[in-house]
Amino acid sequence: MLTAELIRRIRRIEITTRRAVEDVLAGQYHSVFKGRGMVFDEVRPYQPGDDIRVIDWNVTARMNDLFVKQFIEERELTVMLLVDASGSQAFGSRGRMKNELAAELSGLLAYSAIKNNDRVGLIIFSDQVEKFVPPKKGRKHVLRVISEVLSHRPRSRGTDIAGALQFLSRVSRRKSVAFLLSDFLAEGFATALKVANRRHDLVCIRLIDPLEESLPGLGLVSFQDAESGRTVLFDTTRPAARRQLSDWFAEQRQRHTRLFRQLRLDSIDLYTNQDYLRPLVLFFQRRASRR
């Protein structure tokens, strides 16, 4: 059951993301993600410079004049959102938690999709697939997507990105646009990424909290691993210790960045304490310029 506070948060995300799509993102999304192919629309009179391969000889014979077939893009796509709900997502030092950022991004991408007459589906995963919402269209469906991500209480703390990508391939036989939202603090998903990127148009959105890059000196701090539950006492007054932790996060990100590049897979980093709209717009613009 949705509480009044949760309903207010869902409504706030809906208003924010819908405005962002209508004002900024709708055209960017359309120019970047193309439909499945070209379908016949109508015939028109031949004009100098037209490709002779598209001449409609049946109509030409009947009308005793040259006519060509005209095609339009088959626009409708299926957009799948794969949202990490593992324990590390329930973390945020400033602004918002990672899972809250994931909910806002899900709303933004879902509204962009339905604005372009595409269908949206949702896969929420930890170390297992915990929720599957089949692709549909419409504002009510977008509200359901936002609600599911925002209100979901994971049954498990672990992360299995490979399992989520394999599930995507089972439920989406045709090529889809798939957004994978995670902090990627996991292992063993390189092969699954490669396979999914071959079948689908896959975009990895990496969610980062600034505390992971620079830990302040706060004295003795008790840290609990959000996924294993293990607790350790950490002396943040020691610069070397803080640097060691920051270096570990940096090494993880660099390794995954190299993997994304090796697979020629689009990725974008978004921070919990920063506005995400401008980086997304720049990402779409860069991607559109490569087409």
Image (tube, grey):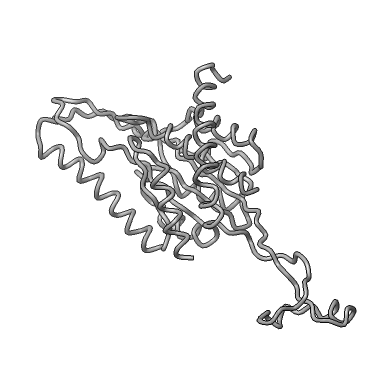
Residue 127 sits in which quadrant? top left
Q: Is residue 52 left or right of residue 98?
A: right
User: Which of 92/124 is in front?
Assistant: 92
Q: Quadrant of the N terminus?
A: top right
Is residue 42 shown left or right of residue 258?
Answer: right
Q: Position of residue 161 (x, y in %)?
A: 44, 47
Q: Residue at x 64, y 42 (%)?
A: 134
Q: Is residue 117 above or below residue 151?
A: below
The answer to whether residue 58 is visible is: yes
Residue 43 in the image, given as x and y percentages of width and height: 78, 70
In the rendered image, the residue lying farthest to the front is 48
Q: Is residue 236 above or below residue 75?
A: above
Q: Nearer the viewer, residue 100 or 157?
A: 100
- Residue 235, image x and y in percent? 13, 30
Camera-side residue: 280 or 230?
280
Q: Is residue 28 above or below residue 16?
A: below
* Residue 38 in the figure: left or right of residue 59: left
Q: Residue at x 44, y 56 (%)?
A: 285
On screen, residue 232 versus residue 89, left or right, reads left
Q: Residue at x 51, y 42 (%)?
A: 23
Q: Residue at x 47, y 47 (%)?
A: 180
Total marks drawn? 0
Residue 122 appears at what percent x and percent y? 56, 41
Asked whether the viewer can see residue 128, the reply is no
